Amino acid sequence: MIVTQSLGVGGEGSLLGTTPPPRGGAALQWSRFVPATAAEGPGLRAAVWVQGCSVRCPGCFNPHMWAERGALLDDPADLASRWVEDARAAGAEGVTLLGGEPFDQADALATVAEAFRDAGLGVMAFSGYTLDRLQAWAAERDGVARLLAATDLLCDGPYLADLPDTRRPWIGSQNQSIRSLTPRYAAEVDRIARDGGRDALEVRISADGAVAVNGWATDAALADLLDDLGVRGDRVASIRKGTSR
Ligand code: SF4
């Protein structure tokens, strides 16, 4: 099942992400969709931020996405057909599922992931659960099994703030792994395991002056950048880090 991987190191004693994920409802709880970004995985890809996370890593960069409160609620099949069309129109090569915790809504999100796969697009997912645990739960949880089966590239494991990772892109701590579950991104994962890689940050300024940020930079670097752009902090909608980063 694993083609290539950049294996995480450390954090064996952590209890984060050891409880099976909730089953989630029929509707997808989500927060944001971007049809094309270069900051959330290999190449140009769509990104879906789901709302809700039961892993709750101390120091998480998206604590505002832990609660289900405030989520958009929609039928996953309807979202999937719309998002696939938007992603293709924007020239995206695949989609990244992040949040929040994607595997807390495995059934609904599997429908989305499968639609991207059926359209010939790649699927990357973040999870605060480790692959070992997801595979064990998949034996009894159809949604977890489906979402894993539809995932080409998985970044897994909880975010441990005392083990920061600055060598590899996308993930936030050294215990987290980057795994190619199909050959689609195997060369990229191989290259990261060998050479590491850099994170990217995207800042979008809409016509009404609202600013949205995604990707990853340190708080200090982000503050300096926004200062340079003359942007007030309260104008920024920031979803800067994916699940488990
Ligand atoms: S880092 Fe990811 S898994 Fe951990 S609490 Fe934050 S959203 Fe949840």
Image: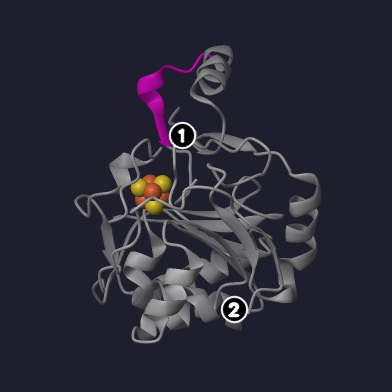
Disc marking residue 148: none
Ligand 1 lies under 8 Å from the Cβ of mark 1: no
Q: Position of residue 41 (x, y in %)?
A: 63, 53
| Nearest the eye: 13 or 124 | 13
The answer to whether residue 20 shows anywhere in this view is: yes
If you read the primary sequence from the N terminus, does the residue marked by circle 2 or circle 1 appear first? 2
Q: Marks 2/1: CA distance?
A: 36 Å
Residue tagged by mark 1? 162
Instruction: For mark 1, give the secondary structure.
Output: loop
Q: Position of residue 162 (x, y in %)?
A: 46, 34
- Residue at 75% from the left image edge and 51% from the top image edge: 192
Mark 1 surroundings within 10 Å by alpha-carbon count, few (fewer than 14), some (14 through 19), many (20 or more): few
The answer to whether residue 111 shows anywhere in this view is: no
Q: Which residues are magenta?
A: 230-238
Instruction: For mark 2, give the secondary structure.
Output: helix
Mark 2 surroundings within 10 Å by alpha-carbon count, few (fewer than 14), some (14 through 19), many (20 or more): some
Residue tagged by mark 2? 117
